[in-house]
Amino acid sequence: MIAETERLILRNWRPSDEDAFHRLNSDETVMAFFPFRRDRQQSREVMDRIMREINETGYGFGALQTRDDETAIGFMGLSIPTNLEPHVPRGIIEIGWRLVPEAWGKGYVTEAARELLRIGFEEHGLDQVVAFAVPENVRSTAVMDRIGMRHQPSRDFDHPFVPDSHVHLRRHAYYAVTAPEWLARRG
């Protein structure tokens, strides 16, 4: 899974990315809308799992870097959500991202997400792509709006993996864009 834009490269993870991946899973600012932080070992296990998923399915969250620096600034990708039925039906593909704070506000996510939607619809023949986030995560929901996704309030759901200790993070807004909607917007 490799994608490129004018300023960015989306690539598979490398062993040298372990520190960056750990930061994306432990930094308080990055993880503000998530109920957990991962230690170094847990991060490594997740990174290994993501690399396997990408190799096996062609879908997953790869490392995002700028063209002028090989350091991962985040992750992005088209992924197969698991164990979220009936909220996210089996076979639906999700777009997602997470960036370090110093990369925020530069349009990187929007730029890469537009290319990922193009790949999903044009190269993979997807019918629809979805995304979901805690409604208060306005940075992410604003990107969803910018890339042509529309909030579908009737599909909002309580995320089953958010523990009772973080009930304020349980509700998730559901966004989607279909291939015809994407093509009409692009055309």
Image (tube, rainbow, N blue to C red):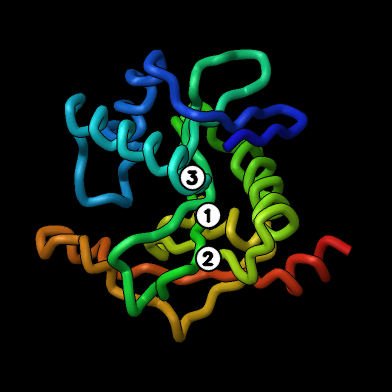
N-terminal label among 2 and 1: 1
Separation of residues labelled 3 and 2 (CA atoms) = 12 Å
**At numbered mark 2, what does the secondary structure look like: helix, strand or loop?**
strand
Number of the label disc, if any, that sits on residue 142: none
Residue type at tag 1 = Ile
Tell me whether circle 3 and circle 1 mark residues in contact (CB < 8 Å).
Answer: yes
Q: Examine the rendered structure and indicate whether residue 79 appears above or below residue 40.
A: below
* Residue at horizontal 20 percent and vertical 61 percent from the top: 162
Please, which residue is most extreme toward the front here?
56
Instruction: Name the residue carrying label 2.
Output: 130
Picture coordinates of residue 66 (x, y %)? 62, 23
* Residue at horizontal 83 percent and vertical 61 percent from the top: 186
- 90, 70: nearer the viewer: 90
N-terminal label among 3 and 2: 3
- 32, 118: nearer the viewer: 118
**At numbered mark 1, what does the secondary structure look like: helix, strand or loop?**
strand
Snapshot quadrant of residue 129: bottom right
* Residue at horizontal 67 percent and vertical 20 percent from the top: 67
Number of the label disc, if any, that sits on residue 95: 1
| Residue 28 seen by the camera | no
Please, which residue is most extreme toward the bottom here?
154
Residue type at tag 2 = Val
In the displayed structure, does residue 77 sit left or right of residue 80? right
Separation of residues labelled 2 and 1 (CA atoms) = 6 Å
Number of the label disc, if any, that sits on residue 97: 3
Picture coordinates of residue 3 (x, y %)? 66, 36
